[in-house]
Image (spheres, rainbow, N blue to C red):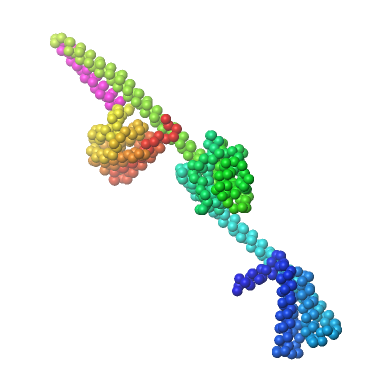
Amino acid sequence: MRSLRARLVSLLLGPTAPPLAPGIAVAAGFIVAETLVVYLLNTRVAPHVQFGQVYLLGVVVVAAGWGLGLTVITSVASSLAFICFQNWPAVSSLPIRVYDWVVIAISLVVALSAHTLAGLARTRAADADRRRREAEESRDQLRVLAEQQAALRRVATLVARAATSGEVFPAVAEELARCLRVHYAALWRYQPDGTAIVVAARDEPGVTKMPVGTRFSLEGESVPAMVLRTGRPARVDSYENAAGSTAVRIRELGLRGAVGAPIVVNGRVWGTTIVGSSRPEPLPADTEARVADFTDLVATAIANAEAHAELTASRARIVAAADDARRRIERDLHDGAQQRLVSLGLELRSAEASVPTELDALRGQISHIVSGLTGVSEDLQEISRGIHPAILSKGLGPALKTLARRSTVPVELDLHVDRRLPESAEVTAYYVAAEALTNSAKHAQASQVNARVEADRATLRLSIRDDGIGGADICRGSGIIGLIDRVEALGGRMEIASPAGDGTSLLATIPLEKPEGVD
């Protein structure tokens, strides 16, 4: 009932008047009904009372809903009906008296007053409706802004914690589709051969999918082609008559219009962020700006990822170069200095054997020199082992077993590596294990070390724990810091926990694939 009353008031006091024909019907209906009411009142309630006010109701209703002309006509017709009813049944010989003119005049005044008041009411209703719409639009804008800011914060959080492109790209597509309420949102990356590849996409359920990895030509008319040519945001409000294979594919997806913004990384157009709609009306005018807000974050994420990849590759190249230098030094020491020392030792032994028996003092001196050369050779051999672990030539497993046997602290080794791994990973794991065992013996006062090594297709994991005194401070140990740098240079991670009194544990995770940019 309340809804019906509200709709009736809205109809009567709306910004535009209802059609004239219903107004005439309403006016005639009111006059007939009012006459019937006056007749019943005069015959059954108060025979001597005129009840002319009843006829004003129809005039007020018509004045509220229709124009001045129909209001005046309704007023005059109501007055004539009242006069006729008063003189019934002598209607045909009815003389128009001064009283009758007064009735008509009063009715016209009431009509004009009702029309004026209805106009004021209509104006106020229109103002109230306008304010209501503005308030709703303002609330919608604030809600949209709040949603977009929340979405941007979520994406910015991913970028700040250096999330991978595989995490950032789908998140951007999802947030764009949700914030802009579009059927399609995607990130396209431009290729050197003049095509573009979809790297992330979010499709509305029920819409034909555009799979990630799909390659598109940039010939013809399309938003990706326009963005690449201009380096600026672009839009196509209708793909209905657009030329090109990409436009055909977009029409097949059921998309009518699209808006895109460039992703600019280090001054070059890396790709584009696109939103599309299947609705007939164009996307809102502020769509370009809203999409651009997200592309800025995407560009930051890409730039960060590229910078991190370049840094990792650079560090890996430095580590690889250092390993090569160590290998050359170790080989030079082994093949050069050590061999010469051995040769000199043999010659001196030969000379010692040829010394006459009466020259025992000389034989003793030569023997002493030979012993010294042997010691120097052994020292040099130990130095060369520290420069580059030659025992890795047999693989990581045998090398770690050798380390465990040489350790002054008993080592329980749980080895799950049954194949050769990339040299960089083996060398890094060897140095990590060697440093950990050395620290356990020299500083941790440990009585037992547990080491576990395992490798799958993609990752090598090295876990070492001792039962020493703990409390190790990696900031004060250049060896540990250097190992952390070496592990991270390969794209891995090393975690160290050393609570006081509870031993030290180390976990190194080393990827078995070389970082991008490393030969």
Where does residue 36 sit, x and y in percent of width and height?
72, 83
Q: Eyeballing the image, is 34 above or below 448?
A: below
- Residue under the point 78% across and 77% down: 77
159, 381: nearer the viewer = 159
Q: Is residue 367 above or below residue 282?
A: above
Residue at the extreme left: 357
Q: Quadrant of residue 234?
A: top right
Instruction: Give, as a single range, the part of the protein colored magenta.
Output: 359-384
Q: Position of residue 452 (x, y in %)?
A: 29, 40
Q: Report the magenta stretch's main SS.
A: helix
Q: Is residue 422 above or below residue 112?
A: above
Quadrant holding the N terminus: bottom right
Q: Nearer the viewer, residue 491 or 34?
A: 34
* Residue 454, quarter of picture: top left
Residue drawn at the location 73% of the way across and 80% of the way down: 32
Q: Position of residue 418 (x, y in %)?
A: 29, 36
Q: Foreground: 200 or 351?
A: 200
Residue located at (33% from left, 27% from top): 387
Give the residue drawn at x 49%, y 42%. 213
Q: Is residue 372 magenta?
A: yes
x%, y% of residue 104? 81, 78
- For the C terminus, give its image quadrant: top left
Q: Is residue 407 left or right of residue 282?
A: left
Asked whether the viewer can see residue 430, the reply is no
Q: Is residue 382 visible?
A: yes
Give yes or no for residue 433 being in the magenta stretch: no
Q: How many marks?
A: 0
Query: 351 and 248: which one is in front?
Result: 248
